[in-house]
């Protein structure tokens, strides 16, 4: 049995953190589903920027005559939705078999809206409508301004992947927004079973402190944050508040591990996958990490529900001068800024490709 299948059997969903037209056209994504137990997929502006930049497969759609007056942002969403609809169809059997627990794909609202509640909600509703697939998550950042939009989107029945979470506190704020949306649906007599995941980013923690801590703490902060957050997740699932909405038909907002590719070339290429193995969670990983785990991974003991030694490790980081709460806010702000840069690059790329191909024709 491949390690990826063993991890799936443990109860963790393996999602691919990538999408390109080449993955779809070559049958590679279907092979990952069949051979590596992949049951979902995520995307972000950086992924699409790289996909369109490094492929000619989007060119014909970019220069179609009917696209001449379409703004680069609207044209991008057409390209992205075309890919994600195909991916959603590939995962539809998983979605149907699990009654909507698994088998999802994700599309992010414009990162320019990360601090604009009203426009974020409007964009999420529009993309959900345009997608037209029951297994399409709309990604909304878990920034303070994003939280009211998450609540409102859930109340409106839009499935949400909350992105850019870095700490237990940010996760709990996102979970609270989700539950408020669900509770409002129950109060309004609506079906409360609106799906959501909360995406906690892991490896960026270790990049941020790698040169600031003793050698024996290198590459341990992201995992310790994961342990702390996992305990909070398990506590929330056992809480009276969640059990009340579950009794009314609500779904749990699953915890998702994001940014789980190892950044340090000296560390194991499956470091975070092995450490964050836990039932009823999702790990969305880059292709290289997925293949590496399929080739030489192993599944050990799952994460301890009480967080294991996470708090002890975090105490050592505090003693080393790391202010985790301040760093979490910084990482969220930097993550939002990074996606904005990728978005700006992407919009420029779409516009420049269209202009260059028009001249060539």
Image (spheres, grey):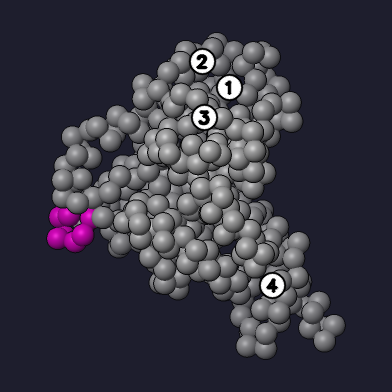
Q: Nearer the viewer, residue 150 or 137?
A: 137
Circles 4 and 3: CB atoms closer than 8 Å: no
Distance between the alpha carbons at the discs numbered 4 and 3: 39 Å
Report the residue marked by disc 4.
58
Closer to the chain start, of discs 1 and 4, is 4
* Whether label 2 touches label 1, CB < 8 Å: yes
Q: Which segment is the magenta one? A: 186-192
- Circle nearer the viewer, 2 or 3: 3
Q: Nearer the viewer, mark 4 or mark 2?
A: 4
For marks 2 and 1 on the same chain, the one whose residue lies earlier in the sequence? 1
Do callouts 1 and 4 mark residues in contact (Cβ within 8 Å)?
Answer: no
Q: Is residue 276 left or right of residue 172?
A: right
Please give the residue where the numbered disc 1 appears in the rendered image. 220
Quadrant in the rendering for residue 219: top right
Q: Is residue 62 above or below residue 278?
A: below
Residue projecting furthest to the front: 1
Residue 308 occupies quadrant: top left
Where disc 1 sits, the SS reads: loop
Q: Are marks 2 and 3 in contact (CB under 8 Å)?
A: no
Assign the magenta stretch its main secondary structure.
loop
In space, the residues marked 1 and 4 are separated at their CA atoms by: 40 Å
Nearest to N terminus: mark 3 or mark 1: 1
Q: Residues within 10 Å of mark 1 (few under 14, many from 20)?
A: many
Earlier-in-chain disc, 4 versus 3: 4
Q: Earlier in the sequence, mark 4 or mark 2?
A: 4
The disc label shown at residue 299, or none: 3
């Amino acid at each position: 049995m491949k390690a990826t299948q063993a991890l799936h059997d443990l109860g963790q969903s393996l999602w691919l953190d990538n999408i390109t037209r080449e993955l779809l056209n070559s049958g590679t994504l279907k092979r990952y589903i069949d051979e590596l137990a992949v049951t979902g997929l995520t995307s972000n502006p950086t992924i699409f920027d790289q996909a369109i930049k490094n492929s000619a497969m989007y060119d014909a759609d970019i220069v179609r005559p009917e696209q001449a007056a379409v703004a680069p942002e609207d044209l991008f969403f057409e390209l992205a939705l075309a890919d994600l609809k195909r991916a959603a169809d590939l995962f539809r059997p998983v979605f149907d078999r699990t009654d909507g627990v698994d088998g999802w794909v994700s599309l992010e609202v414009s990162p320019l809206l990360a601090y604009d509640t009203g426009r974020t909600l409007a964009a999420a509703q529009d993309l959900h409508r345009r997608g037209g697939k029951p297994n399409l998550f709309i990604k909304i950042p878990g920034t303070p301004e994003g939280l009211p939009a998450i609540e409102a989107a859930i109340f409106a029945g839009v499935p949400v992947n909350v992105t850019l979470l870095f700490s237990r506190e940010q996760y709990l704020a996102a979970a609270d927004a989700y539950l408020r949306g669900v509770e409002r649906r129950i109060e309004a007599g609506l079906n409360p079973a609106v799906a959501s995941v909360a995406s906690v980013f892991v490896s960026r923690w270790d990049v941020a402190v790698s040169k600031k801590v003793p050698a024996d703490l290198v590459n341990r902060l992201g995992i310790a944050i994961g342990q702390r957050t996992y305990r909070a997740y398990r506590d929330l699932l056992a809480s009276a508040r969640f059990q009340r909405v579950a009794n009314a038909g609500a779904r749990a907002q699953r915890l998702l591990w994001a940014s789980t590719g190892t950044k340090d070339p000296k560390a194991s290429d499956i470091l975070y996958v092995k450490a964050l193995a836990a039932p009823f969670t999702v790990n969305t990983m880059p292709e290289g990490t997925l293949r590496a785990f399929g080739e030489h991974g192993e599944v050990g003991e799952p994460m301890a529900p009480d967080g294991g030694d996470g708090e002890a490790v975090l105490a050592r980081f505090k003693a080393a001068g790391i202010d985790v709460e301040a760093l979490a806010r910084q990482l969220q702000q930097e993550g939002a800024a990074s996606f904005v840069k990728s978005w700006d690059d992407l919009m420029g790329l779409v516009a420049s490709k269209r202009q260059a191909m028009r001249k060539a024709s």
